[in-house]
Amino acid sequence: MKLDPLQLIEYEIALLVRLTTAHSPRLGSLDRSEYLILCELDENGPLAINVLAEKLMLNISTASRQVGALETKKYIHRYPDPNNGRISLMEITQEGQDILIKVQKARYGVYKEILQEWSEEELKQLENNLTRLNRDFKKWGN
């Protein structure tokens, strides 16, 4: 039986997630959620927990738990919002930036090795398609 393209895409994405999870030790010492939170705070911080949760499409309790783990590791710092003391803001610490850079380099190296035979055009096409897919998933979820 021939599968339609959407069935194949769904399977390939599920397999990609599984493979990246299986090889995660080679991708650095942060798990996926820690990596994404640190990236978000590095790019857009400091942020309140509700803003961070919204950006990463997490519920508040999950985001709070993950932020707590990063805070324990001293990768982020939480402090009261100067404009509203009832809200805490989180920002990445120097230790958090150091580990993020280390993990980004490891991840870059892995992808560089895996994709070494791809042409620049193929890489650009993959980048565009993944960006579009993520954007459309975010739109669909709202």
Image (cartoon, rainbow, N blue to C red):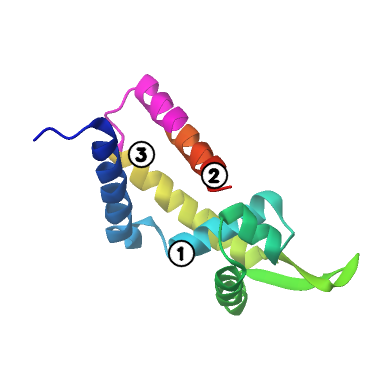
Q: Is residue 27 above or below residue 108?
A: below
Dot 1 alpha-carbon crowd within 10 angstroms: few under 14, some 14 to 19, many 20 or more: some
Q: Is residue 82 visible?
A: no
Membership of 127 in magenta stretch: yes
Q: What residue does disc 3 label?
A: 112
Q: Secondary structure at mark 1?
A: loop
Distance between mark 1 and mark 3 Cα atoms: 19 Å
Query: Disc 3, disc 2: CB below 8 Å?
Result: no
Task: Give left or right: position of 84 versus 75.
Answer: right
Q: Which contiguous range is marked in magenta?
A: 115-129
Dot 2 alpha-carbon crowd within 10 angstroms: few under 14, some 14 to 19, many 20 or more: few
Where is residue 118, by image quadrant?
top left
Residue at the spot 36% in from the left edge and 42% down from the top edge? 111
Task: Give left or right: position of 86 versus 64.
Answer: right
- Quadrant (top left, top right, bottom left, bottom right) of the N terminus: top left
Q: Secondary structure at mark 2?
A: helix
Q: Secondary structure at mark 3?
A: helix
The kind of residue tagged 2 is: Lys
Distance between mark 3 and mark 2 Cα atoms: 27 Å
Q: Position of residue 135 (x, y in %)?
A: 53, 38
Q: Tell how many labels.
A: 3
Q: What residue does disc 2 label?
A: 138
Dot 3 alpha-carbon crowd within 10 angstroms: few under 14, some 14 to 19, many 20 or more: few
Membership of 53 in magenta stretch: no
Q: What mark, if any, has residue 30 been given in the picture?
A: 1
The kind of residue tagged 1 is: Leu
